[in-house]
Every structure is written in structure tokens, then in C-alpha cells.
């Protein structure tokens, strides 16, 4: 798969993930009136957008892929921690695994895989370019 197609699919997955988090934000803020989870989900939803734009504008930079991998893995770890007994460390009870949570995690695993593949392609093309210059 060429790099443009991969970045396009990756950005699409990121926008879908962002959309799920916007829905989660509205549920938490307006239905549950949770002033901790709601703003957190809003920040996550918004954070994917500029990073996706960064990937489109700079597809040959490694940094947006690394930022995406690290941020997404961090969100997944936090999600897992808040679904176990470790939730007490965050001052909350262990939450249940909801439909939107599962959808977002599936999308996020796709984002991680796509970012890793794009990072590999970026490093390969950089290596090939350096060899061609010599």
C-alpha cells in the first residue's frame, strides 16, 4: 500500500475515533452531568484533529505518528485502568465497558497499527533516500 493511501486511511480512522469521543462527550456532559469524564473525552476528541492535519501536511515526518501512537496507547491504558480496581487511584469506581468504549478501542487499535505502518514506511523511505544520496 502506498504512503498516501495509508495516511488517508489513518486520518479517516482518527476522525472516526474523534467522532466517537464527541458522542461520548455529549453523553457524559449532558446526560450524566459528569464534569470529569466529559471534558476529558472532549480533549481527546479535539486532540486527534490537529494531529491528523499534521499527518496530512507533513506525511514524511515521523513525529505525528509517534505522537499518535504514544497518545493512543496512553488513552487505552487509562481506559483499562479505570475499568479495574485501579480506578480507585483516580478517585472513582470501576466503570463498565460500554458500546462506545468498545467502538473507540477498535478504532484506536486501527489507529495504532496504521501509525506503526506509516512510521515504518517513513523510515524506509528515509533510509532509501540516504542510500541514494551516497
Image (spheres, rainbow, N blue to C red):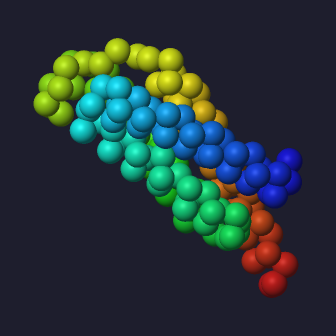
- Where on the picture, by quarter, is residue 38? top left
Whether residue 88 sits left or right of residue 111 in the image: it is left
Q: Nearer the viewer, residue 95 or 133?
A: 95
- Image point 55% across, 62% down: which residue? 50
Coordinates of residue 56 in the picture (x, y in percent): 70, 64
- Where on the picture, by quarter, is residue 134? bottom right
- Image point 61% across, 46% down: which residue? 14
Residue 109 visible, this orientation: no
- Where on the picture, by quarter, is residue 27? top left
Coordinates of residue 36 in the picture (x, y in percent): 25, 38
Total count of labels: 0
- Image point 41% across, 37% down: which residue? 25
- Image point 67% across, 70% down: which residue? 58
Whether residue 110 sits left or right of residue 21 in the image: it is right
Whether residue 83 sits left or right of residue 44 in the image: it is left
Coordinates of residue 90 in the picture (x, y in percent): 18, 33
Please tell me whether residue 86 is drawn above or below residue 72 in the rendered image: above
Residue 18 visible, this orientation: yes
Amino acid at each position: 500500500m502506498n504512503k498516501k493511501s495509508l495516511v488517508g486511511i489513518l486520518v479517516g480512522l482518527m476522525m472516526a475515533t474523534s467522532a466517537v469521543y464527541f458522542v461520548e462527550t455529549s453523553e457524559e456532559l449532558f446526560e450524566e452531568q459528569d464534569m470529569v469524564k466529559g471534558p476529558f473525552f472532549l480533549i481527546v476528541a479535539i486532540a486527534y484533529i490537529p494531529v491528523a492535519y499534521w499527518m496530512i501536511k507533513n506525511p514524511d515526518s515521523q513525529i505525528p505518528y509517534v505522537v499518535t501512537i504514544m497518545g493512543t496507547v496512553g488513552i487505552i491504558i487509562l481506559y483499562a485502568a479505570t475499568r479495574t480496581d485501579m480506578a480507585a487511584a483516580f478517585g472513582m469506581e470501576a466503570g463498565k465497558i460500554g458500546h462506545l468504549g468498545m467502538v473507540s478501542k477498535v478504532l484506536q487499535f486501527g489507529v495504532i497499527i496504521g501509525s506503526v505502518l506509516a512510521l515504518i514506511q517513513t523510515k524506509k523511505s528515509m533510509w532509501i533516500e540516504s542510500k541514494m544520496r551516497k
